Amino acid sequence: MRLFLVRSLTRFAILGSVLAAASFFVAVAADKKAEKTDAKSTEIKFEAVKLGRPVNFERDIYPALEQNCIACHNVAINESKLVLEEVKDIVKGGKRGTSVVAKQPDKSLLYLVAARKKKPHMPPLPNNQDAKAFTPRELGLLRQWILEGAVGSKGGNKQMLQFSPLPESAKAVYSVALSPWNRFAAAGRANQVEIYDTTLGEKVSKLVDPQLDKIKFQDKAMYPGGAAHRDFVHSMAFSPSGNMLATGGYRVVKLWKRDAVRQIAKLAGPAAVTSTAITADGKIAAVASADNVVRLVNLADGKVIRELKGHTAAVSGLAFYPHPSETSRLAAVTAAADAALVDATTKQATAEQAVKDFDPKALKLEGEKIAAEKKTRTDAVAAAVKAVATAKTALVAAKKAEAEFAKTAGASSQLVTGSQDKSVRVWKVSDGSVVRQLVTPAPVNDVIFTKDGARLVSAHADNLLRVWMTVAPKPAEKKAADKKKEKKKDEKAGPKPVLEIKGHSKPVTGVALILPAGTQIATASGDNTVRVFDVTKGNQVRSINVGSPVTGVAVRPDGTAIAAASGNFARLYDMAGKQLAELKGDLGLVRALSETTEDQNVAKQLVGIADGKQKAADKTAKDRAAAAKKAKDAKTAADKKVAEQKPKFDAAKTKSDTATKAFDTAAKALVVAKKAIVDATKKAADLKKVADDAKKAADVATKKSADAAKTSEAAKKAAAEAAKKLTAAQEAAKKAADDAAKKKAADAVKAATDAKAKADKAAADTAKVAADAKKASDVATKKSTDAAAASKGAAEAKTKADAAGKAAQAKNDATKKAKDAADKETAKQKGELKKTTDAQASADRTQKLADKASSDAQVSLKAANADKAAKDALQKTVDAAVAKDTAAAKAGEKPITVVAFSPDGKFLLTGGADQKIHVWYAATGQAVDTVSGHTGAVTALSVSPSGVVLSGGADKLAAAWDISPNWSPAGQLGPQADKPLDLATSPFVSRVLSIDFSRDGKMLVTGGGDPSRSGELMIWDVAKKTMIREIKDAHSDTIFGAEFSRDGKKLLSGAADKFVKIFDVGSGKHIRSFEGHTHHVLDVSWKADNSSIASAGADNVIKVWNVDTGEQRRTIGGYSKQVTSLRFVGIGENVISCGGDKSVRYHKTGNGQNYRSFSGGTDFMYAAASSRDESFVVAGGEDGTVRLWNGKNGKLVKAFSR
C-alpha cells in the first residue's frame, strides 16, 4: 500500500473542493494553463547515476513522485486518468496512453514531461505548492529505472511507507476539540496539534512526539520545530476528565496526557507556616513559621539556605524587594518587543515582495504614475527597514534590561518581616543581616515595600497602617547636647513612621501595593471592608464593603482588579469597587455536582420518555385487551350463527339430494322415452319409405305389366297382320304371271314370311314379357300391401312412443323444477353457511391476532413498566446523588483566608480551611484547577515570576508547585509499542477520521477505512492501549463519524456508504441502520437521552432520526455545501455544525431552527465544537485559522493562525 495524502481520502475527500495545501505532495495539473504557465521552462539534462545496484522504485523513484506528482495522480484524484502510486498503474498509464515504456525512457511520457522535453512540463512552474522540477539526479534515477525495465521493488511496498516533510503552505485545520469544562481548545493544523486556553485566548501548548525528532530527511531533521504526527491530524477528542487528548492521523492514534500538578520542592518545618514570599528572580523563598523563625529556602529543591531569627512572636507578614512583579513586567516588555519585531519583519517582507511584484501593465499604470507607484513601494520598504531596525534596538534593550535585572535582583534583595511581637525588620537576603528594625505600637499583620523600595507599609492590629522609611534618614548636624538628647529620645521611642493611615475600624489584616503606579495600596480589615489609600498622602481613595471580615487582599499586577478573601468566599472587584466575580467552593465538588445535575436532567428526560412509553404501552395494552375481548365475542357470535345455519343447510341439502335423485330418474326415463321415440320415428320413417318404395315399385310393375300386355296385344296383332300379309303374298305369288312378277311375288312372300316370323317372335317375346311383368306386378303389389301394413304398425308405435315421451318429458320437467328449487335453496343456505363460516374463520383469525397483540402488548407493557421503574429508580439514585453532591459542594465552601495573583495577572489563587489551593481565572473568576497536598489549612500563598506557586499550611508544610503542567505523549494505538514509527504493522488500514471516548474514559472508538473498499470501526481499551473489538464489515466505505452513547452501551457510526448505523458495544452486533442521505455521511452524534441521533451529510443537510423506529424526525437544510462536522451540545436538543460554505451554526433539532451563526470563516470549514453550556464555540478549516467565538452572542473572541 502506498501512503499518499489527498483530501479525498479524508473526511473531506468527498467534499469536492480543490486539493490545496492538504497534501505532502504538489498538485500536478496537466492542462493548457500548466502549459502556458510553464512555457519558458528549459530542458533538464539528466545526471548519469551509478548506484552499484539496481534502482529501487521505493527508495529511489517514489520520493520524487511523492514530492511532486502524486497529489494529482492518485486513486482518488487522477488527473488525465493517470495514477502514479503503484508501478502497475504507472505502466498502465492514463488517457494519453502508457506513461512508461520499459527500457525506453525516450519513448516514456513520464520521463519526457519530467525532463521538460515534452509538454505539458511537469510539475508546472511556478506554483504555490513548493514544487520543484526534477533535479538532474532525480531525472537520472528515473531514466535508469526505466532502462532497467521499470520494475517494482521486491516484496511490494507495504512495509515501506515513504514520508516527506509537509510544505509550509500546508495549514488546513481538519480537527478541533474542546475539553469537557471549556478550559482548553485543541486543534490539528497540518501535522501539528496546538492547545489553547479559551478564557485567556492564547496558545498554551504545542504537542510534540519526541519519536519524530529522530527522523532525518536529506540529512536534516524532518521536523525541526517538532510535530505531533507525520501526516495531517484528521480527528481528535478530549477524554471526559479533560486530562487526555487522543489524536488520529495516518494509521495511528496518539494519546497525550496533561501532566499532573507537580510538587517541585517542599519544606517540612517545625511549626505552622504563617507567611511566604518569593524573590524577584524566583530562586529564593521566605517561609515564616509559628516558631517565630523565617527560613530562606532554595525554591528549586526546598533546602534551607539560612534561618532569620530575632522575632519573639509569630511572623505574620513577609515581602521582598525588588518586587517579583518587576520580573514579569520586564518579561512582558521583552515579549512585546519581540512581537513588534516579528510584525515589522513581516511588513518588511510584504513591502519587499510588493516591489518585486510591481507590474505596471498589470496595474494599468502609465507615465508619471509608474514612477509614483514605484516610489511609494520603495519608500514603504525603506520605512519597513527602519521600523525593523528600531524594533531590533528595542528588543535588544528589553533583553538587556531583563538580563541585568535577573543578575542583580537576587543579590540585592531585601526582605521585610512583620510580627505579632510588634516589630518590623528589614533583612539583607545575601547574608541574613538585619538592615533595619522598627518597633511598632501594635502587632503587625502584614508588610509590603513601596514600588521604589524606599518605604515600607505595615498593617496593624490597632486598625492603622504605618508607612516607614526603609533606611534610617541621615541625621542633620546638631550640637553635642542636642545629639545627646535626641539619642536618649530615640532609644526610648525608636524610629517613627513617616505616615499613619487611619480609616479602618478594626484590625488591618492585609495590605497590597497597587501597581504599576505604586502610589496606592489596597488593605483588608476585620471591619468587612477593603480600602484603597494613597500611600504618599494617607488619604482614603475608596472603600469597598465586602460584607464580612476580610482576611486577605491582593491586587492584580496590572492594577486593574482587587481580590479579597472573606468568610467562605473570595471576591474580585474592579478598581472602582464594582464586583466582578465571587469565588467559592471546591472545583472538583462543583464539577461533580454539575455532572450529577446533568445526569439528573438526563434522567428526567429518560423518565419522561419512559413515562410516555409506559402510558402508550398501557393504553395499547388496554386497547388490545378490549380488542381481544371484542374479537372473542365476535368469534362466539360467529360460532352461534354457524350452529344455526348448519341445520338449515343440511335440510336444504337433503331435499336437494332427493329432488336430484328423482330428477335423475326422470331424466333417465326421458332419455329412454326419447330414444324410443327416436327409434319408433326412425322405424316408422324407414317402413313408410319401404311402403312408399314398394308401392312405387308395385305401381311401376303394374304399369310395366299393363304396358307389356299392351305390347303383347300389339305384337299379336302385328303377327296376325303379318300372317295376313304372308297369306296375301302367297296368294299373290300364286297369282304371279311372269317371272318378274313371280320373283317379286316370291320376294314379297319371303319378306312377308320374314316379317311374320319376326312378328311371331315379337308376339311370343312380348307375351312372355307381359307374363313376367304381370307376375312381377303381382309380387310388387303384395310387397306394397305388406309394407303399407308394416308402415301403419310403425306409425301407430311412434304415436305411442310420442305419447310416452311426452309423459316422460313432463315428469322430467316437474322433477327438474323441484330440483332447481331445491338446489337454489341449498345454494342459498350454502351461501349463508359460507358467510357464517367465513365470518367464523375471520373472527377466529382476528381473535388469535388480537390475543397475540394483547399478549405482546402485555409483554411490552411489562417491559415499559420495568423500564419506567428502572428509570424512576435511576431518577431516585441520581436525585440522591445530586442531593449528596449539593451538600458536598455546599460543605466545600469553606473559609478562604489567603489570596494571590500570578505575576502575569492571568490567575488568582486562593487558600484556606479546605487544605487546598484553588486556581481561578483572574479576568472572570472561573475556577481552573485545584491543588491538593496539604493536610492542614492553607495559610500562605506566593507566586514566582515564572508561575511557581509557594504555599504554606497549618500542617507545617511549605511546598512549591508547578500549576501549569504541560502535555506529553502517553502512548499510541496502532503500531507495535516497540516499533512506534513502523506503521506497516498497524491494524488501521488508512487514516483515522473519527475518535470518541466513552463517558467513563475507559474506551475509545476509532472510525476510518480504505476509501471505496472498507469501513473500519474499532473499540480500544485506553488503559491497556489494546483493541477490545473490531466490528467487521460495519460499513462498506470509509467511516467519517463515530460516537459512544452517553451510557456507553451503544455505538453510532456514519460512513461514505450513506448509512448511519447503531451497534452494540458489548457484542459488536448491528442494531439498526438509518438510510436517507444521498451522499457520504460525514459526522454523527447522539442526543444525551438516546432518543434521537443526528447526522451530517455531503448532501448539504443535517438529518435527525428517531432511534427507536429508525424514522427521520426532520431534515435541516440551509447549507450550500457539505456539512462536515456535527455534535449535540451538552444534554439538550441543540447541535453545533459547520460546512463547506464557510459557516458554523447552532440548530435546534426540535424544529430545525438555525438560531445562531458564527461568522469569520474565509474558506471550507472542516471541524467545529461547542462547550456544553454554549459559552464557547471553536472551529477550523482550510484557511488554517482556529476561531474561538462566544457561543452566547456569536462574537469572535480570538483567531489563532500559524
Image (cartoon, helix red, strand yellow):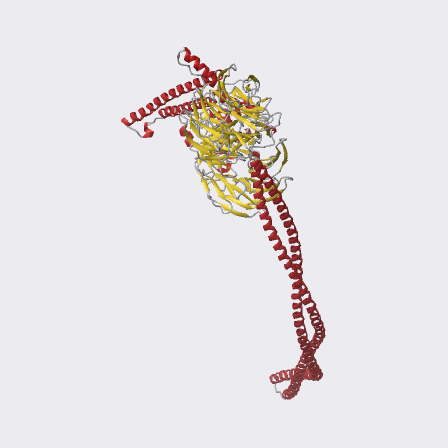
The x and y percentages for residue 558 are 44, 27
Can you say which quadrant of the picture contains the N terminus? top right
Q: Is residue 327 found left or right of 669 in the rendered image?
A: left
- Closer to us: 1063 or 838: 1063
Vertical position of residue 252 compared to residue 862: above or below: above
The residue sitting at 30% across, 29% down in the picture is: 365
- Residue 584 seen anywhere in this rendered image of the structure: yes
The x and y percentages for residue 180 are 54, 35
- Total labels drawn: 0
- Residue 406 seen anywhere in this rendered image of the structure: no
Outermost top residue:
480
Vertical position of residue 307 compared to residue 599: above or below: above
Q: Is residue 1049 found left or right of 208 in the rendered image?
A: right
Q: Is residue 185 found left or right of 374 in the rendered image?
A: right
Vertical position of residue 474 compared to residue 769: above or below: above
The x and y percentages for residue 416 are 49, 20
Vertical position of residue 321 compared to residue 246: above or below: above
- Closer to us: 924 or 816: 924
- Closer to us: 336 or 6: 336
The x and y percentages for residue 655 are 71, 73
| Residue 732, image quadrant | bottom right
